[in-house]
Amino acid sequence: MSAHEIRPPLYEWDGLGFETRSVHVGDTDAHGYRARITPIYLTAGYRFDSLQQGWDRFTGEDPGQIYSRNQNPTHIVAEQRIASLEGGTGAILVGSGQAAITTTLLGLAGAGEHIVSTATVYGGTQAIFERTLPRLGVGVDYVWDWTDEAEWDAAIRPETKAIFTESIPNPRCDIVDVAFVARVAARHGLPLVVDNTVATPYLTRPFEDGAHIIIHSSTKQLSGHGAGLSGVIVDGGNFDWEGASRAYPGITDAPAGGRSILEKHGRRALEVYLRTGIVNDLGPALSPLNSFLLQQGIETLALRVDRHRDNAHRIAHWLAEQPEVGRVDYAGLPDSPHRELADRIYGGKPGSVFAFSLAGGRAAAEVFYDALRIVSRMTHIGDTRSMALHVATTTHVGFTQEHRDRLGIDDGLIRLSVGIETADDLIADLRQALDAVASA
């Protein structure tokens, strides 16, 4: 019996609380040893009982294991758990958040086709959109004002295959109303892909607002410890692939004499298509060790996010009062243009990643950055440890000055990912770094 056949289905956990599901969903003991913690299955492949079983697995009739390139028993727990927390029908673990984005979009769009994205998405995501997808013939256009329906209508073409956005964009915390964008996607008959990395399902669940696919760089908040890379794609099971005005042949077309993936798997069609097609072909496999580490992080997600956002809220308000700081991009501030959304969607505390800009520009930012002691200087977010990054010289260094200016990435901008340390200690560290700026 395969691990797929014995794992508890998602619906068995319906009605239980977020914290309970974070700890228990997906638990399985495939070999009956009664291990309380999921084993790490360090294996490349799996034996078939017979020729027939191998055939059935390769044709999708048997959902059991084939090869760890597209599935591993250790992954099942994290996949089931994240799908439950987001409210999806299934999930796929891959090697990183970048792999999750690339896998999803290449599954939806091919050469000569097109994606539309909100403009203020993570710099690494924009690198995929501007450097890699065009080489494969997939075009990407940006909508700069996501509240402007006319701008959406102008950007969407007959060859557009998906809309992409982030629930809380990184680095400037300029919140997107996913429900609004979902209405645009529905009007045009397009699947909506939402990167929910910063918010996590603890703060918002985009499927409830009309999204169809959710992506996480699960290296970040879902793991929380920074010990291993991973990414996840969650299928909402709520897009009408058959009735769509645009063609998604990998899901709807049937091989000669056979049935389509949609006919075989129904609401899980996208998950199965990406896993057996795109993931299997491109090979962005996740190590089972990293999958195991991800599971350990998910167990404490709710506890950590509460501490993260309390610390971030306090620190953002404190930074806004400091004379050396010219601007704080935190949606929970009273004067933020995103305050209404922050209050309505996130209870006034929109996550733990935001940016602020030193009034003295690049010179001040360099002095401040190099003076930090507790806050780590590194490219990462969502860790238990607080981290800072000078955005213009790192994640956005390859962008033109005009593009950075339009994104609001000035030379004094510092991205801050607030951890779970004692808030007073973090403020003291920020203050001594600001003192270094004042002295300089």
Image: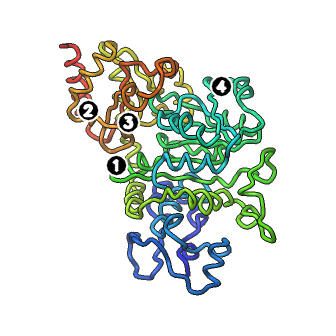
Dots 4 and 2: beta carbons under 8 Å?
Answer: no
Secondary structure beneath label 2 = helix
Question: Relative to residue 312, is residue 80 drawn left or right?
Answer: right
Residue under numbered circle 2: 426
Mark in the foreground, 3 or 1 = 1
Q: What's the distance in space between the residues labelled 4 and 3, CA to CA?
A: 29 Å
Say the numbered circle drawn on residue 246: none
Does label 2 or label 3 sit earlier along the sequence?
A: 3
Give the amino acid at mark 3. Answer: Asp
> Which quarter of the figure has residue 175?
top right
Q: Residues within 10 Å of mark 4 (few under 14, many from 20)?
A: some
Q: Residues within 10 Å of mark 1 (few under 14, many from 20)?
A: many
Question: Relative to residue 428, is residue 79 drawn left or right?
Answer: right
Residue under numbered circle 3: 310
Residue under numbered circle 4: 147
Q: What's the distance in space between the residues labelled 3 and 1, CA to CA?
A: 20 Å
Dots 2 and 1: beta carbons under 8 Å?
Answer: no
Does label 4 or label 3 sit earlier along the sequence?
A: 4
Residue under numbered circle 1: 226
Give the amino acid at mark 4. Answer: Thr
Mark in the foreground, 4 or 2 = 4
Quadrant assignment for the N terminus: bottom right
> Which quarter of the figure has residue 355?
top left
